[in-house]
Amino acid sequence: VQLVESGGGSVQAGGPLRLSCAASGDTICVSLMGWYPQAPGKARELVASITNSKSTDYADSVNGRFTISRDNAKNTVYLQMDSLKPEDTAVYYCYAGSVPTQKAPNLACAEHVWWGQGTQVTVPS
């Protein structure tokens, strides 16, 4: 699975930005996708995730400001970020994951994680 992020940039505090993550390759086992920002000197932290059935989950820090969505036909996940704050500044990595499951009689999925190359989001203070 290959993940390619786009949509990063610099935006004033309070403004919006929309990130995209396009998945390609053998995506049949991917069950969960999400976004992990990583600020300088800090670990990556999950801020939003979405399952194949479009169930979503958010970190408290972005709840009500960020919206994750996906277009299964395009294998693309989006992160709509509104009311951006300087503390949202980070490199945003797209994540895809699979869990051990029998997807079909002849197809077993294993646990695996894939990462994109990251896209920079900057909100000047």
Image (cartoon, rainbow, N blue to C red):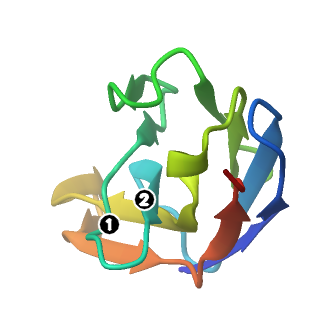
**Rendered location of residue 33, percent (x, y):** 46, 51
Dot 1 falls on a residue whose secondary structure is loop
Residue placed most toward the observer, 53 or 45: 45
Question: Which residue is labeled 1 in the image?
Answer: 44
In the displayed structure, 72 sits above or below 26; it is: above
Residue 109 showing in the rendered view: yes
**Rendered location of residue 2, percent (x, y):** 60, 82
Three-letter code, disc 1: Arg
**Rendered location of residue 88, percent (x, y):** 54, 49
Q: How far apart are marks 2 and 1 (CA)?
A: 6 Å
Q: In this view, does 121 lie to the left or right of 86?
A: right
Residue placed most toward the observer, 5 or 50: 5
**Rendered location of residue 96, percent (x, y):** 44, 63
Three-letter code, disc 2: Tyr
Q: Residue at horizontal 35%, vertical 62%? A: 97
Q: Residue at horizontal 50%, vertical 62%? A: 28
Mark 2 vs 1: CB contact within 8 A: yes
Q: Is residue 124 left or right of residue 113?
A: right
Dot 2 falls on a residue whose secondary structure is strand
Badge number at residue 80: none
Residue 29 showing in the rendered view: no
Outermost top residue: 64
Question: Which residue is labeled 2 in the image?
Answer: 36
Q: Residue at horizontal 43%, vertical 23%? A: 55
In the displayed structure, 71 sits above or below 86; it is: above
Residue placed most toward the observer, 17 or 87: 87
How many numbered tags mark residues here? Answer: 2
Q: Which of the two labelled residues, at mark 2 and mark 1, occupies the earlier sequence position?
A: 2
